[in-house]
Image (spheres, helix red, strand yellow):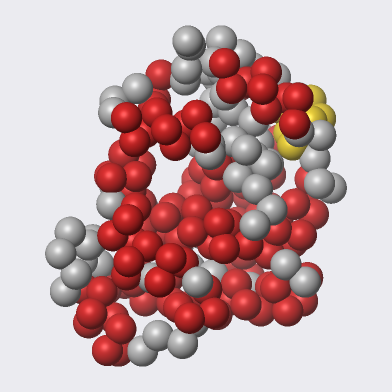
């Protein structure tokens, strides 16, 4: 069975690739989890995030954004002292801050998923060349989403971070066409083919 090469390092990465990465996501708690894992990942690697995922869930109450939004100094200290946790006060504070911004987006749009999918009018984008492995770190779409999230106060939301999130939550299908998930996700997605040069 062929898979995208980035996931082949260990079983947890393979499972994440096979079961979650690129699946159209409309559950707000999972959106928050994926997005905040991207925050924690900044400057590190995704394999580390997958290995530490259960620690993150423990620290942030399974990424319940309403609970995280209420966190204070005692919670920050608790998280910093959790064994195996990434000990970055700035990132932990950013997750808490972002939970509050996330709530504001939900209040305005009804759900975060409705907000983020509005950028593609509920479509999954399939860019020419990406399925052959010619994948950028960012593009015009991620630039626009990044700018809007920053305007709404979210932190650690650079275009590269946002592009990774758009891949993870199925707004962009960046599986290789040789990967077994590529065609499976095409069948369950409302997909629009896009030209890369239009998204620079």
Residue sitting at x 58%, y 76%: 101
Q: Quadrant of the C terminus?
A: top right
Relative height, residue 5 to residue 60 (above, below): above
- Front-lying residue, 86 or 161: 86
Residue sitting at x 55%, y 56%: 30
Q: Quadrant of residue 138?
A: top right
Task: Report x, y in % for residue 67.
Answer: 48, 81
Residue sitting at x 62%, y 20%: 182
- Number of labels in the image equals 0
Relative height, residue 80 to residue 75 (above, below): above
Task: Report x, y in % for residue 40.
Answer: 36, 58
Task: Report x, y in % for residue 174.
Answer: 59, 28
Relative height, residue 199 to residue 88 (above, below): above
- Front-lying residue, 26 or 197: 26
Relative height, residue 62 to residue 195 (above, below): below
Q: Quadrant of residue 47?
A: top left
Q: In this image, 120 relative to 148: left or right?
A: right
Q: In this image, 26 relative to 177: left or right?
A: right
- Front-lying residue, 39 or 181: 181
Residue sitting at x 75%, y 52%: 117
Q: In this image, 110 relative to 49: left or right?
A: right
Looking at the image, can residue 3 be seen? yes
Looking at the image, can residue 147 be seen? no
Task: Report x, y in % for residue 86.
Answer: 23, 61
């Amino acid at each position: 069975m062929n898979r995208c090469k980035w996931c082949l390092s260990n079983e947890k990465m393979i499972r994440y690739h096979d079961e979650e990465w690129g699946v159209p996501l409309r559950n707000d708690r999972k959106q928050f989890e994926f997005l905040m894992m991207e925050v924690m990942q900044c400057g590190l690697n995704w394999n580390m995030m997958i290995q530490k995922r259960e620690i993150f869930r423990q620290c942030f109450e399974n990424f319940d954004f309403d609970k995280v939004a209420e966190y204070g100094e005692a919670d920050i200290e608790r998280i910093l002292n959790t064994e195996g946790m990434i000990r970055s006060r700035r990132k932990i504070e950013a997750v808490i801050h972002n939970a509050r911004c996330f709530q504001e987006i939900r209040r305005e749009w009804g759900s975060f998923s409705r907000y983020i999918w509005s950028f593609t009018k509920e479509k999954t984008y399939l860019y020419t060349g990406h399925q052959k492995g010619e994948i950028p770190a960012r593009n015009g779409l991620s630039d626009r989403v990044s700018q809007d999230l920053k305007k709404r106060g979210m932190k650690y939301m650079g275009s590269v971070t946002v592009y990774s999130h758009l891949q993870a939550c199925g707004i962009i299908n960046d599986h290789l066409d040789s990967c077994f998930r590529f065609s499976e996700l095409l069948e369950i997605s409302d997909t629009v083919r896009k030209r890369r040069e239009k998204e620079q």
